[in-house]
Amino acid sequence: MVLWPLWSEFLLSWARTRRYWFNTLANLGGSLLYFYAILLGFSRLTPEEARFLDPGPLLLVFTAFNLTLFTFQSIAYTVQGEAQLGTLEHMALARGGLLRQLLLRALVQSLFGVLWSLLVLLPLALAFGVTLGPLARWPLGFLPLFLAALGFGLLMGATALYFKQVDEFFTIVQFLFLPYFFYLVRFEPWMAHLPFAPGVHLLRLSLSGAEAPWGLLGLALFQGLLLFALGLWAMAYMYRLVRRRGILGRF
């Protein structure tokens, strides 16, 4: 049964949120200040400098960035954190194995990430006068981005399975994400084949109420499934490797 482990992951995430509520509020406040400072900086540009910048698309790309980051962290940091606690091998003993348990946790934490992103998006949208008109099918715009982020998280989780202590590497990756997502604010057709780009653009269109072409949806789904399959392969390969070498949960 999948429902019981899934419910257990919900209970675990909720218990951590309640137990460490101060850290949760500080993190939320930090995210709000972080994105507000960036948007405020752009709003202070001269009209000539800001003529290509619109706070609406910028804010929606920030939302896509936030969702991607949550999904990436839900796997990559789980592997590293469980290794540090010495409980990674316990997760591997769960019914269905380590990979299924990681995917269930990623699903739950990504749902928390959607809520978190909305808590950041809505106050900033009000502060900067950004009008949102999400389509009823906006979750369909989220799905390809989620699959791509999940695949990338599995790729990063595979590195954590082997090297265990990878904080600095993950920090570098996250900082590289920010300018990369900035670059996607003004989406051009040639960007469609860049990683995450079609999913980000699709989510932005869905949240702003604009109609998304079906070709873009197909391309975003293909890219998301491709990254997800690559991530599954990398995680499965590394899992076999560390078990064969006896270094699954050992530093």
Image (spheres, rainbow, N blue to C red):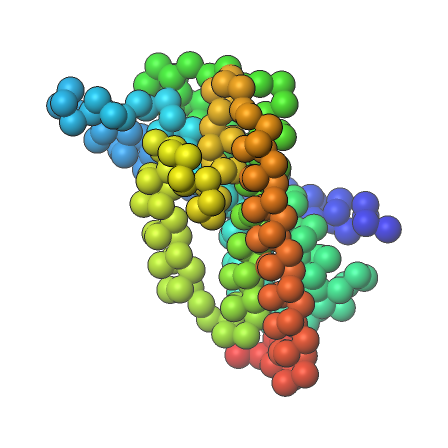
Residue at horizontal 51 percent and vertical 30 percent from the top:
203
Q: How many marks?
A: 0
Q: Nearer the viewer, residue 75 or 88?
A: 75
Which picture quadrant has residue 124? top left
Viewed as shown, does residue 180 lie left or right of 222? left
Residue at horizontal 42 percent and vertical 60 percent from the top:
170
Residue at horizontal 53 percent and vertical 19 percent from the top:
211
The relative height of residue 223 versus residue 202 in the rendered view (above or below) is below
Residue 113 visible here: no
Q: Position of residue 233 (x, y in %)?
A: 64, 64
* Residue at the right extreme of this rendering: 1
Which picture quadrant has residue 28? top left
The relative height of residue 163 versus residue 146 in the rendered view (above or below) is below
Q: Position of residue 201 (x, y in %)?
A: 47, 32
Residue 98 visible here: yes
Q: Position of residue 250 (x, y in %)?
A: 58, 79
Q: Position of residue 200 (x, y in %)?
A: 47, 36
Residue at horizontal 25 percent and vertical 25 percent from the top:
52
Q: Nearer the viewer, residue 190 or 95?
A: 190
Which picture quadrant has residue 146? top right
Viewed as shown, does residue 114 lie left or right of 101? left
